[in-house]
Amino acid sequence: MIQNIENECYVAIAGSVGNLPKVNNMDIQFAQSMVFTPCDFSFPANGIKAEATTNTEMILIADVDLDLLKDLNQFGSMRNLKDRRKDIFELKKK
């Protein structure tokens, strides 16, 4: 999930699992829900905070620390605003 590194955010994906027998094209569904983190220091190396069991109906609960994202923004290995290429573009406040 390279997007998590670039956007410095948590990402939750929720898959629908189970049976809906009276709904067309939704009679049976298979998925896996997960919560992803940036792949940087202070976060899991694989970028996975929590994951549900594959193809099982369950509730996934994960605690995320928003202060870690603030620290990542200031001291992480990739600092989007500080490491931007000023020779290519510039930011102007309107």
Image: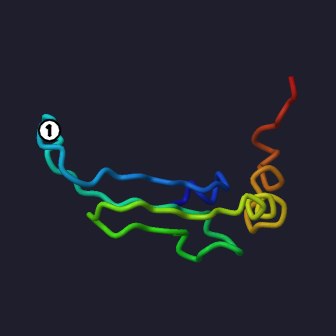
Task: Judge from the rendering whether residue 84 lies leftward or rightward of residue 28; answer left or right.
Answer: right
Residue nearest the observer in this picture, 8 or 86: 8
Q: Position of residue 89 (x, y in %)?
A: 77, 38
Residue at (50, 54) in percent of width and height? 12
**Picture quadrant of residue 3:** bottom right
The amino acid type of the residue labelled 1 equals Asn
Q: Which residue in the rendered view is the most extreme toward the top? A: 94
Q: Residue, x 30% and y 60% (percent of image)? A: 57
- On the image, numbered disc 1 is attached to which residue? 25
Task: Provide residue 45's location: percent of width, then percent of height.
Answer: 58, 77
Q: Is residue 19 left or right of residue 73?
A: left
Q: Quadrant of residue 34?
A: bottom left
Left or right placement of residue 60 versus residue 88 in this view: left
- Front-most of residues 87 and 62: 62
Q: Position of residue 31 (x, y in %)?
A: 29, 57
Taking the spot 77% from the left edge, 49% from the top edge, the residue there is 85
Residue situated in front as seen by the camera: 4 or 92: 4
* Residue 87 versus residue 23 in the image, above or below: below
Tag 1's secondary structure?
A: loop
Q: Position of residue 61 (x, y in %)?
A: 51, 62
Q: Please determine whether, in this image, residue 60 is positioned above or below residue 23.
A: below
Specify the quadrant that holds the C terminus. Answer: top right
